[in-house]
Amino acid sequence: MNNLQKTDKQVFRIITNEEARQQETLSMIPSENWFSSSVREAVGSVMSHKYAEGNIGSRYYEGNQYIDELEQLAIDRAKKAFNLPKTWDVNVQALSGSSANLAVYLALLQPGDTMLAMYLPDGGHLSHGWSFEPDAKKREKDVKSGLLVYTGGSRKVNITSILYNPVQYKTDPKTSQFDYKEIEKIALKYKPKLIITGGTAYPRIINYRKMKAIAKKVGAFYMADIAHEAGLVAGGAFPSPVGIADVVTMTTHKTLRSGRGAIILAKKELIEKINRAILPGLQGGPHNHNIAGIAVGLGEAIKPTFKKYAKQVVLNAQALGKALQAQDFKLVTDGTDKHLLLIDLSHEPLLGRPFARVLALAGITANYSTMPWDSRPPRNPSALRLGTPVLTTRGMKEKEMVKIAEWIREAMRTAEPWKELSFEQLEKEATKSKDIKQIAKEVKELCKTFPLA
Ligand code: DSN
């Protein structure tokens, strides 16, 4: 960093400020983490200079002996971390979770095929298929079908709906959890070629065996996207779909705490097609520096200390959930089985977006989110999403979760008088507020006690 300070003061200042922001505030966005300095070193290494289109031993460029060695090491460590059966193989070249998912579709589907995944506003993911229906009356047609289903709308806002036909299962209106009998009925009616589980805001365990049975019944492939849970799976704190699903995709930078990228695990008979979908199908040269980060992160994830980390991430999220309930907050699904939870703010003075801004000014970074059966739009939804991966990386435990829940309630109490204000006015009030500043000060003190290494 010293050299950057001399050669480019502007970029150096921005990076230094961002580092201080991460150090001095509580990142509670469940898809974020803080990598070890070894992962950061690998990601910032000369590996990013090299072009390596192709696969190990058959590249289109010379000089790839060390890139081959690195990619093989990453693959071998992924096999170990995810306890891969001998009949499965690995691809570590996808640049992101969305690219990994798209590669699977390109490999397994034909244009126009139906894919069945979790309804996006219930906590699914954009890359699992999405088209938006702006006309509320037209959206009613799905409700009238008698199934908990969304069959898509006229605005094909994502490549998945331009190329394929996404159909989505909704969660049970009473429990906000999967209704497997309903998913089976939907699968039988719409006959998808691919069934997908996973998402960004579903706090509960998914029954992979039931999903596989449904897929088998309709002759579909089953892909489990464990982007959020990958580290918990590797650390033995969450069930694994490996060996049950046909394909497992994940990002590497969330709970897995490795470099930024993605891993695809698949049955051997599918991996060749998936490799070809990555290159030449979708991508050019792999980002070798990120693969280096992934290899280092996986090396950390197969150590016993990572098991402790993964377990504590879940214990912290559950403790946070209980502490929030003790502060009279309502949680979607009444709690969590993993690293994230959703607060239902529909009966609170502030909804997700304004409350996320107030919390940010109080030193707690979270993000607003839709929740199952939310009547409000994604830009102004009813829920707030919180997670514990970074807090746990800092070494925080259950005791700190109780304190954080108190601050969150205190921030809501402070913000109540601003509930009728516009977003901009509320932001001004929150910026001026002595009480919000006081929380930010206390947050900063706690962060100093648990520095990020
Ligand atoms: N954007 C990620 C998340 O926040 O969950 C998923 O891609």
Image: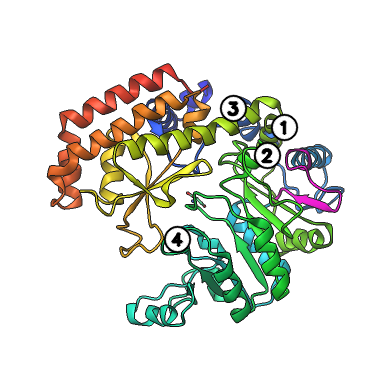
State the separation of the CA atoms marked 4 and 2.
Answer: 26 Å
Disc 4 crowd rating (10 Å Cα; few below 14, some 14-19, many 20+) is many
State the separation of the CA atoms marked 2 and 3.
Answer: 17 Å
Q: Quadrant of residue 307 in the image?
A: top right
Q: Are marks 1 and 2 in contact (CB under 8 Å)?
A: yes
State the separation of the CA atoms marked 1 and 4.
Answer: 33 Å
Q: Nearer the viewer, residue 159 or 404?
A: 404
Q: Residue beneath label 4, please?
A: 122
Q: Earlier in the sequence, mark 1 or mark 2?
A: 2
Of badges 3 and 1, the one in the foreground is 1
State the separation of the CA atoms marked 1 and 2.
Answer: 7 Å
- In this picture, which residue range is highlighted in magenta? 79-93
Disc 2 element:
helix
Q: Earlier in the sequence, mark 4 or mark 3?
A: 3
Q: Quadrant of residue 434 in the image?
A: top left
Give the amino acid at mark 4.
Answer: Asp
Q: Which residue appears at 46% of the width and 20% of the height?
A: 451
Q: Position of residue 85 (x, y in %)?
A: 82, 48
Q: Is residue 430 magenta?
A: no
Q: How many marks?
A: 4
Q: Is residue 90 magenta?
A: yes
State the separation of the CA atoms marked 4 and 3.
Answer: 33 Å
Of badges 2 and 3, the one in the foreground is 2
